[in-house]
């Protein structure tokens, strides 16, 4: 018997939607649709890298410009959290702490060296995709810091690991005059006066509320280890692509037999369905914080209808 919820997208009449790792892929699709009105595209099999490449054919500097296409509904809760922080220093600290909740191809660290404090962005992706994504996340962060402080925040120095692109002149708008390419790391250095800039919308109540929830989600994400962590990661990827996770397809992806994978999970005190419930509950919290309605959350979590999602949700609450 397949260890998955019976009422999922399997057998559903509506076509499967793939979400390309969340809002980024959806915004890229909207961008491409707007460039060629009336064109009918099937993005269902497209990967994120292909979407970026298609967008770059219209605008080689799309990584610098994509965030301008985001609507409030597309924003991750982290981009809102920074607006409630005390100052820029606290905002970048929150970005580094909670980045694993926003993306599985991005990791962030605060580093301090002889040149000062820097935000270091690491992207696990092919070189061309990494350049676009680094540009996008850096512009996103600077945009929110500018909105929050009311000041045109720019780093004291910007270092990028990739070669200088042909459109490098556009970097000055965001990154100032001290811009370096072909570096060992991708870093934005922020000087003390910039770090001390107050966020005009500082709200201790909202800050505490959001960080409490994000800490809970971070703890849930970190509870997985060993084979459970590998399966949880595979489940997240499946759901992000509009696929239905099952013990069988996860075992195949990990080059295990279903029986062996079931045994490995049981050794960690989990069944596949329990793990699937934990991951879905984690993703549900993320989608709720983004303001999505129940119907869209049900679709994102792989359910054919709202009733099936609500029934399963009751079971998650017993797991919690």
Image (cartoon, rainbow, N blue to C red):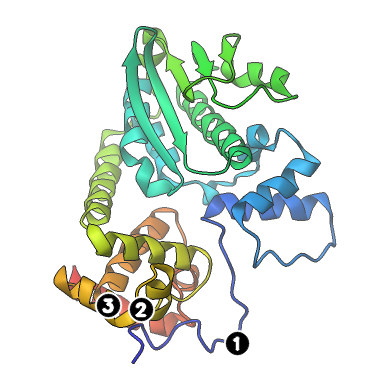
From the image, tell me which residue sits under label 3: 260
Q: x, y percentage for residue 13?
A: 60, 87
In this rendering, position of residue 253 left or right of residue 85: right
| CB-based contact (under 8 Å), mark 3 and mark 1 | no
From the image, tell me which residue sits under label 1: 13
Q: x, y percentage for residue 45?
A: 65, 66
Q: Is residue 268 above or below residue 160?
A: below
Q: Which label sits on residue 4?
A: none
Q: What residue sits 35% from the left and 68% below the top? A: 280
Residue 161 visible in this rendered orientation of the protein: yes
Q: What residue sits 33% from the left and 92% below the top? A: 1
In this rendering, position of residue 37 left or right of residue 31: right
- Mark 3 or 1 closer to N-term? 1
Q: Is residue 113 above or below residue 147?
A: above
| CB-based contact (under 8 Å), mark 3 and mark 2 | no
Q: Please name whichever residue, 84 or 164, is drawn nearer the observer in this view of the structure.
A: 164
- Label 1 SS: loop
Q: Is residue 5 above or below residue 299?
A: below
- Mark 3 or 2 closer to N-term? 2
In this rendering, position of residue 160 left or right of residue 219: right
Could you tell me how far apart the alpha carbons at marks 2 and 1 are, in whole angstroms?
23 Å
Q: What residue sits 75% from the left and 24% below the top? A: 166
Q: Please name whichever residue, 51 or 256, is drawn nearer the observer in this view of the structure.
A: 256
Q: In the rendered image, which quarter is residue 262 located in?
A: bottom left
For disc 1, the neighbor class at 10 Å (few under 14, some 14 to 19, many from 20) is few
Q: Please name whichever residue, 150 or 250, is drawn nearer the observer in this view of the structure.
A: 250
Could you tell me how far apart the alpha carbons at marks 3 and 2 are, in whole angstroms?
10 Å
Q: What residue sits 42% from the left and 59% below the top? A: 287
Q: x, y percentage for residue 290?
A: 44, 53
Q: x, y percentage for residue 121?
A: 45, 31
């Amino acid at each position: 018997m397949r260890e998955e919820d019976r009422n999922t997208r399997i057998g559903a009449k509506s076509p499967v939607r793939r979400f390309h790792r969340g809002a980024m892929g959806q915004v890229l699709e909207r961008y491409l649709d707007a460039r060629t009105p009336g064109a009918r595209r099937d993005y269902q099999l497209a990967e994120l890298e292909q979407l970026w490449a298609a967008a770059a054919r219209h605008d080689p500097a799309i990584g610098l410009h994509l965030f301008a296409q985001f609507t409030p509904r597309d924003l991750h809760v982290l981009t809102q959290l920074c607006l409630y922080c005390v100052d820029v220093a606290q905002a970048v600290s929150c970005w580094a702490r909670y980045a694993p909740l926003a993306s599985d191809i991005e990791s962030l660290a605060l580093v301090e060296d002889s040149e000062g404090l820097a935000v270091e962005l690491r992207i696990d992706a092919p070189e061309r995709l990494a350049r676009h994504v680094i540009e996008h996340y850096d512009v996103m962060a600077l945009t929110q810091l500018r909105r929050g402080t009311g000041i045109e925040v720019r780093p004291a120095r910007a270092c990028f690991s990739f070669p200088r692109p042909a459109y490098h002149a556009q970097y000055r708008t965001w990154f100032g005059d001290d811009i370096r390419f072909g570096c060992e790391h991708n870093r934005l250095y922020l000087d003390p006066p910039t770090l001390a800039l107050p966020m005009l919308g500082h709200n201790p109540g909202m800050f505490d509320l959001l960080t409490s929830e994000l800490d809970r989600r971070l703890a849930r994400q970190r509870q997985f280890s060993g084979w459970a962590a590998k399966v949880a990661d595979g489940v997240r990827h499946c759901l992000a692509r509009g696929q239905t996770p099952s013990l069988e397809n996860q075992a195949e992806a990990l080059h295990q037999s279903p029986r062996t994978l079931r045994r490995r999970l049981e050794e960690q005190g989990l069944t596949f369905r329990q793990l699937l419930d934990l991951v879905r509950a984690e993703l549900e919290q993320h989608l709720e914080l983004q303001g999505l309605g129940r119907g869209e959350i049900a679709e994102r979590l792989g359910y054919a209808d709202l009733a099936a999602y609500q029934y399963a949700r009751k079971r998650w609450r017993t797991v919690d």
